[in-house]
Amino acid sequence: MTAQWYALQSKPNQEQLLWYQLDLIGVEAYLPRLSVRPANPRARTLVPYFPGYLFARLDWHSQPFSSVAWLPGMRRIVAFDGEPASVPEHLITAVRAHVEAANQEQKDPLAGLQRGDRVRLTAGPFAGYEAIFDTRLNGGDRARVLLRFIASLQVSLEVPAALLERARLRR
């Protein structure tokens, strides 16, 4: 029999520990994690996509059940009617692709912007207005822009970084 993927349930907040323990005994494991930008700079930047669960490729004929069942951080193997439930390979591939795509979308919206660059506000009361990027504010999730209202009058606004996009040059 060949190795198949199985879902493992970890103890609360011990997915990383279980993943590490599986690696130590030579078991291929997949812990899908999302990249996040927490408000607290000391908080975790990677969080589990399925909190409390991860996947392991196991062959029950060559890998004894007890070698996995009693690992630190392990709660149980997901089973139905007492039989461990295997997860199809194509589902693991789809989860990998989805998590990778989600992590790509989490990129920094202010990346590459320099003071003086033209930006456009995409939402909120000033949606559609163009402004001049001034600076990134503490935490990186907010920015200060200069919005031109009348003639040469500029007003300083603090806006969420997610509402900004680089303005395209007019032709």
Image (cartoon, rainbow, N blue to C red):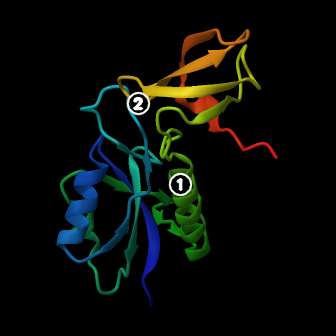
Residue at image position (22%, 53%) is 17
Mark 1, other Cα within 10 Å: few <14 / some 14–19 / many ≥20: few
- Is 84 on the left or on the right of 127, as rendered? left
Asked if the residue at tag 2 contacts the one at tag 1, i.e. Cβ–Cβ closer than 8 Å, the answer is no
Where residue 159 appears, x then y in whole percent?
Answer: 55, 19
Residue 27 at x, y percent in the picture: 29, 75
**Amino acid type, label 1:** Gln
Name the residue: 31% across, 50% down: 15
The image shows residue 47 at horizontal and vertical percentages of 39, 44
Q: Which residue is mark 1?
A: 104
> Which image quadrant for residue 87?
bottom right
Question: Is residue 26 at all visible to an observer of this figure?
Answer: yes
Residue drawn at the location 30% of the way across and 39% of the way down: 44
Real-space Cα separation, disc 1 to disc 2, in angstroms: 18 Å
Upstream in sequence: badge 1 or badge 2: 1
Which sits in the foreground, 26 or 153?
153
Q: Amino acid at mark 2?
A: Gly
Disc 1 vs disc 2: which is toward the camera? 2
- Give the quadrant of the N terminus: bottom left
Tell me if I can see residue 74 in this picture. Answer: no
Q: Check disc 2 and report its element: helix, strand or loop.
A: loop
Residue shown at 57%/49% (left/top)?
Answer: 105
Label 1 element class: helix
On the image, numbered disc 2 is attached to which residue? 140
